[in-house]
Image (tube, grey):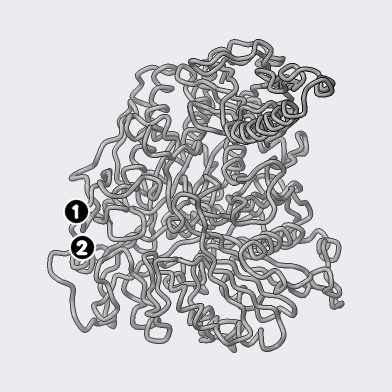
Amino acid sequence: MEEDQKKFLHGTLEFTIFDATPYSPPFPLSVSLSKIFGCPMMFMYRPIPYMFIQCVCVCVYVYIMYNLLKVLSRQCIITRPKPAYVTIKLNKKRVAKTSSERDRVWNQTFQILCAHRAADTAITITLKTRCSVLGRFHVTAEQILSSDPAIIHGFFPLVAEKGTNPSPNLKLKFLMWFIPAYHQPGWSRVIEGQSPFRGIKNASFPQRSNCRVVLYQDAHHNTGFDPRVSDVSWNPRNLWEDVYRAIEGARHLVYIAGWALNPNLVLVRDMESEIPHAIGVAIGELLKRKAEEGVAVRIMLWNDETSLPLIKNKGLMRTDDETAFSYFRNTKVVCRLCPRSHNKLPTAFAHHQKTITVDSRVPDTTTNEREIVSFIGGLDLYDGRYDTEEHSLFRTLGKNHSKFPDFYQTSVSGAKLSRGGPREPWHDCHACVMGEAASDILRNFEQRWTKQCDPSLLVNTSAIRNLVTDPSRTRGKQDGTWNIQVFRSIDHVSATEMPRGLSVEKSIHDAYIEAIRRAERFIYIENQYFMGSCDQWENKNDRVGSGCTNLIPVEIALKIAAKIRDRERFAVYIVMPMWPEGPPDSEAVEEILHWTRETTAMMYRIIGEAIREEIGYNDEIHPKDYLNFFCLANREEKRDGDFTANSSPRPNTHYWNAQRNRRFMVYVHSKLMIVDDAYLLIGSANINQRSMDGSRDTEIVIGCYQPERQIDVNDIRAYRISLWYEHTGGLITPDELSSWEPESPECVRGLRVMGERMWGVYSGDEVVDMGGAHLVTYPISVTKDGEVEDISDGVFPDTKTPVKGKRSRMLPPILTT
């Protein structure tokens, strides 16, 4: 680990900015009138005409000086002290900024996450006013790493801008403390109580204890879905049926924040459902009914400003926001469309949070006590999201879509039900939260609503009778308590309250980094995107121009490299879609694929370097022994009774090829990370700059763990095994999945071999049913040196789209990263 620190500034820089030397005027502007005009008593000895002329001159002088002072004030040359602030830059990118203070006393602390090559890294601390730079202090990463201990503390003189002469007394007092990443205690010590974890700083909400979490995969499960997870009572639940129950049971409030919502969407579709009265009921009708009962139904949707209300245009992102707004007009449901304001690109970014909050009766009690319950995750209440673990392409078209018509296929140009499948299968993850963390999700909604809507329309929750803030006291310990913290990507433009001293909150990014640094055995990720750490990319133009600076990929690579040097086993599994949603030959999709290739190539290059330096050239050790990328896919043989289309696609198109070969990707929309079966992050945030930046898309995530459960017997482990059972379709038995340690060579080899075999089935010329298995290896080749190469012809099956993508000539990277 220490060897790694010589190459990388990898850890946390904690800065405390105290104060600067007091202001001293650069030159005196106060000049005594008596020195210019003599003693006022002289007026007594001069003739009256002369006194009159002298008085006029004094008045003219005062008038001139008054206007001169006004001009100097505007040019920041006046002597009164101006508010000053301090910025901290890491490699020319601003990472922290103090408040503006006239007395130059701040006493503010910042934590700056670092994972940068030491030779290329420098930190600049700058003292500024609104109009000018007063001085700077520079320190290199190599100076920090050579300090023992790595602390810089004192009153330091500042260097002036070029061509200016600073005051020799201009100094800034600060403390800088570098904490290496490997000093973080692991999750096993946190769970065992040996090292308390108090949550992430610079987050709006603290870590809460005594909470409860229910985890979901996909919107629904077929009756026969049974992962048979041993050692823990694991009962996979149906998300949309639970959402229906929660809304139906609300008595005071139903708050929904979403990227998109289709009011005609049907939540409950299974004819064997335990709530048969809900089958076929549209979500919009349910919400209107609850509003008529007196429940405060408030819906806050992202306003895609490319949609037009007059023609109810879907908009570029196809959210149907105007359709939803029109549906609830003139009803008691209050629906608001909220644009995501941004100082540079006001229509480019989105409100991407997906939450549902209700008041619910506390279960297993005989009283009328109620609690706040919140749903959070990746699933919108929108078209195409309803799916089961089967992820069918063709077989459910006739059976389901005739009753519940929401055929969804946005990744094939020209697709529609009348022309036949494949539909776009949808895999996603979600959670339900109870306890104080659920109330934090409620407060997030209230802060956003207050910022962009009418706050008088919100319910005063303190006036709700029998509302319990700590439901664990009535439930007891039988459900297993959780520690949960709510994280956000958001700024002051979209929320009324922010962490102290910050205008932008990016606690989701900080939580990901913290979780990775504490990892000891393995990391499992499912995410719609995977890109970042552009400072380490090989292509210089991409490094400079992409702006994709989040540290998640390089943190994972450095964790693996450190474990290789320590001769410890470690494994990372990353599941993502073959390509981002949309036609694969579109400019946006191809550029995102390009950023993804840059990211994966960087990670394998770091791992390859660690293997060569520590182990040497060894044919038995390969980068894929530590890091593997997968995607999900399906292929179905034609059966009697399959849906018959009225027309067919144009020959030799992507649509025609996919239909003829009866195959398509399963779209991975999850936003999930599991670390060591001990800690879990789940929510709406993608692993890209848009979601992690804080000033782009707004996001919300929970980080949670069970402090009273053993790592090998807890709900997080059961959830991971359940996900793997779904992805492998029974080809790997539940007993094998339960017995494999995820970091072991046996587990890595087993999943990789299966993924390669299923990729052969998926990409082959013969139409062969995949039999319920969906996990396939992402179509890249990696050499033992860590170089990423294309396989076969380097394009996705049925398309002409290169797996490595390409840069767009039109789109600015800020949109695609």
Image coordinates for residue 32, horizontal then vertical, percent:
75, 20
10 Å crowding of disc 1: few (<14), some (14-19), many (20+) = some
Q: For residue 158, what is the image quadrant? A: top right
Q: Nearer the viewer, residue 437 or 394?
A: 437
Q: Can residue 110 be seen in this view?
A: no
Q: Is mark 2 on a helix, strand or loop?
A: helix
The residue indicated by pointer 2 is 654
CA–CA distance between discs 1 and 2? 8 Å
Q: Is residue 205 visible?
A: yes
Disc 2 marks which amino acid? His
* 783 in relation to 142, above or below: below
The residue indicated by pointer 1 is 800
Question: Are discs 1 and 2 less than 8 Å apart at CB?
Answer: yes
* 535 in relation to 21, above or below: below
Q: Any mark on residue 618, and which?
A: none
Q: Which residue is drawn at 43% across and 40% down?
A: 548
Image coordinates for residue 379, horizontal then vertical, percent:
51, 65
Q: Nearer the viewer, residue 701 or 729?
A: 701
Q: Which residue is drawn at 36% across and 65% down?
A: 316
Image coordinates for residue 245, horizontal then vertical, percent:
65, 78
Give the left or right position of residue 252, taking residue 563 as reference.
Answer: right
Q: Nearer the viewer, residue 429 or 19?
A: 19
Disc 1 marks which amino acid? Lys
